Image (cartoon, rainbow, N blue to C red):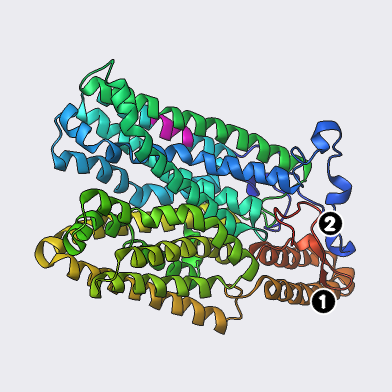
């Protein structure tokens, strides 16, 4: 039987409910989508903008739930940082023990992120996988809080370990949801908005936790106060869990109504697929490490840097050090929308890295007001996050996206864990000037990786640095060539030898796989005149 045959077990993840219906192959001959004929008729409330999955308003509601799914994770991740002094005094922790609360989160995810992404592709499916990872995260936070409540440090470490397993895999699931709902539409803006919500979650944590601790301290003292505050913080994870359940229901309903086929090729993710990933994907992973190690470790050490070089007070140093996150919370979705309209993701990544180098150079080599360098760095960070992560969806087939994003998260965790330790040694031995040189060196590596992507993509007629219009034209050319081969094959060989029909189906599936990867539905390409027609499935969030 052909690999694109009708065997359902080979088409969808092992535990994914059988709710999606595949469209008949007849559509490739008629040149129009079968969604119009097969879609479930909606009436009453279900036909309104808020309840109709094809409407932009409904997709905007889904986007809100996607962002809120990760809110609890980012809020609770920095609970120890917001209460650092209280942790040390109430729980009698040394600095080494306190740092271990963060280290135990990062190190396991060097491997577990990749495994979590693969399980999302191969076993759970996106809906069940998101709920499972959110549940693991919630359990981890509760165990962490319980450890504080009874003043048992090893239990707190266990809780942070469990929390990390769920949180990083949940981030992979969020990326998959974003691609599933918004690929070919506002994907860059969606990634920017998710980053914005992540920063909002961290910021709200630092604003709320200290006043909450002071209030709870009226009723509980010492380690019991810390434990109760952590239990109250876990309510944000409960909220995110509810959002994951609602989002799963919305996605299942949308798949049924729109007759959406999430895996049109019928292929299944395998661990051996990693060997087939293109060089452009591996260069993206290099950028993930080389760029972010120049941002997060710098912010972690930035307070003392600003106090020593610019004679800032601790409060002023904290303010300027937080500029990057404040700007990213506002600018990320706006810059993502710009990338959606302009395309050319590789160019924006290149400019982002160049400007980040400029920001670090201003801080290292001049005494110019540090707000200038930090604002430049904040805008660059926002632009890169909005343009880099969607590249994975353009490089890797959708059935491998969980694995691909898992690899990116794993490599990034490894880089941050190792580089964070190295930065501490550099500061102790050479000071902050040498630290800035170290960061600029890593940014140069990211710049080289971006140039490699740009050259490889240009030489292979790739789509990574095309505008949306050019991608559409390129897709139509691919569709034209594929359709000509199909028509020739159907009119000659298949008439003489019916057994060759499987070859035609493989050609059709290959065409649809390529169009799907660049965000174009193969059924929306009119075979009669080889032009792109508007999708009847969904409408954009923002009118052009």
Residue 30 visible in this rendered orientation of the protein: yes
Q: Which mark is residue 484?
A: 1
Magenta stretch: dominant secondary structure: helix
Report x, y in % for residue 432.
18, 65
Residue 203 position within the rendered picture, expressed as x and y whole percent measured from the top left: 40, 44
Quadrant assignment for the N terminus: bottom right
Percent x, y of residue 387: 52, 65
> Helix or strand or loop: what does disc 2 sit on?
loop
Question: Is residue 164 shown above or below 347?
Answer: above
| On screen, residue 490 above or below 239 | below
Residue drawn 86% across the image and 34% down it: 43
Q: Quadrant of residue 251?
A: top right
Depth check: give the residue in front, 77 or 410.
Answer: 77
Q: Residue at x 68, y 72 (%)?
A: 471
Give the Cα distance between marks 2 and 1: 19 Å
Please tell me how crowded label 2 is: few (under 14), some (14-19), or many (20+) other residues with Cα within 10 Å: many
Residue visible at 55% across and 84% down in the picture: 459
Q: Closer to the camera, 4 or 282?
A: 282
Q: Which quadrant of the view contains residue 516?
A: bottom right
Q: Is residue 276 magenta?
A: no
366 or 198: nearer the viewer: 366
For residue 150, say whether it is visible: no
- Closer to the eye: label 2 or 1: 2
Q: Which residues are magenta?
A: 134-139
Question: Which residue is identified by label 2?
Answer: 33
As for residue 137 lying within the magenta part, the answer is yes
Q: Earlier in the sequence, mark 2 or mark 1?
A: 2
Seen as rendered, the residue at the extreme top is 219
């Amino acid at each position: 039987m052909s690999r694109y045959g009708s065997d359902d077990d080979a088409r969808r993840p092992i535990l994914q409910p059988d709710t999606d219906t595949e469209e008949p192959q007849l559509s490739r001959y008629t040149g129009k989508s079968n969604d119009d004929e097969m879609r479930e008729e909606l009436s009453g409330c279900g036909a309104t903008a808020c309840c109709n999955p094809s409407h932009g308003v409904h997709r905007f509601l889904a986007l809100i739930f996607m962002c809120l799914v990760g809110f609890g994770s980012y809020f609770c991740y920095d609970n120890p940082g917001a209460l650092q002094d209280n942790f040390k005094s109430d729980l009698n922790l040394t600095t080494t023990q306190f740092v271990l609360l963060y280290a135990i989160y990062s190190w396991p995810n060097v491997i577990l992120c990749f495994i979590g992404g693969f399980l999302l592709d191969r076993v759970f499916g996106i809906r069940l996988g998101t709920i499972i990872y959110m549940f693991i995260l919630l359990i981890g936070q509760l165990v962490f809080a319980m450890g504080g409540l009874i003043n048992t440090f090893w239990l707190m470490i266990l809780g942070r370990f469990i929390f990390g397993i769920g949180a990083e895999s949940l981030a992979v699931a969020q990326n998959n949801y974003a691609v599933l709902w918004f690929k070919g539409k506002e994907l860059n803006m969606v990634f920017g908005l998710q980053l914005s919500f992540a920063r909002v979650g961290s910021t709200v944590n630092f604003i709320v936790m200290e006043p909450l601790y002071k209030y709870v301290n009226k009723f509980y003292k010492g380690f019991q106060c810390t434990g109760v505050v952590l239990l109250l913080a876990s309510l944000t994870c409960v909220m995110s869990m509810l959002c994951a359940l609602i989002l799963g229901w919305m996605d299942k309903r949308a798949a049924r109504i729109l007759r959406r086929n999430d895996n049109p090729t019928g292929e299944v993710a395998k661990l051996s697929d990693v060997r087939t990933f293109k060089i452009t994907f591996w260069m993206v992973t290099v950028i993930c490490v080389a760029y972010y190690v120049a941002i997060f470790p710098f912010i972690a050490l930035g307070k003392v840097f600003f106090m020593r070089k610019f004679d800032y007070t601790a409060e002023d140093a904290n303010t300027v050090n937080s500029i990057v996150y404040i700007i990213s919370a506002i600018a990320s979705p706006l810059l993502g929308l710009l990338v959606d309209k302009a395309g050319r993701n590789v160019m924006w990544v290149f400019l982002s890295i160049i400007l980040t180098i400029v920001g670090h150079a201003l801080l290292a080599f001049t005494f110019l007001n540090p707000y200038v360098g930090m604002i430049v760095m904040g805008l660059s960070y926002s632009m890169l996050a909005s343009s880099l992560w969607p590249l994975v969806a353009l490089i890797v087939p959708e059935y491998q996206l969980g694995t691909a994003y898992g690899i990116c998260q794993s490599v990034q965790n490894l880089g941050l864990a190792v580089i964070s330790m190295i930065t501490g040694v550099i500061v102790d031995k050479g000071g902050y000037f040498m630290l800035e040189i170290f960061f600029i060196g890593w940014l140069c590596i990211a710049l080289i990786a971006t140039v490699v992507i740009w050259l490889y993509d240009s030489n292979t007629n790739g789509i990574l640095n095309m505008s949306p219009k050019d991608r559409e034209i390129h897709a139509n050319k691919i569709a034209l060539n594929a359709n000509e081969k199909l028509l020739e094959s159907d009119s000659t060989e298949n008439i003489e030898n019916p057994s060759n029909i499987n070859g035609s189906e493989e050609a059709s599936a290959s065409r649809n796989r390529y169009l799907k990867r660049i965000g174009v539905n193969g059924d929306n390409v009119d075979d009669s005149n080889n032009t792109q027609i508007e999708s009847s499935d969904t409408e954009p969030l923002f009118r052009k």
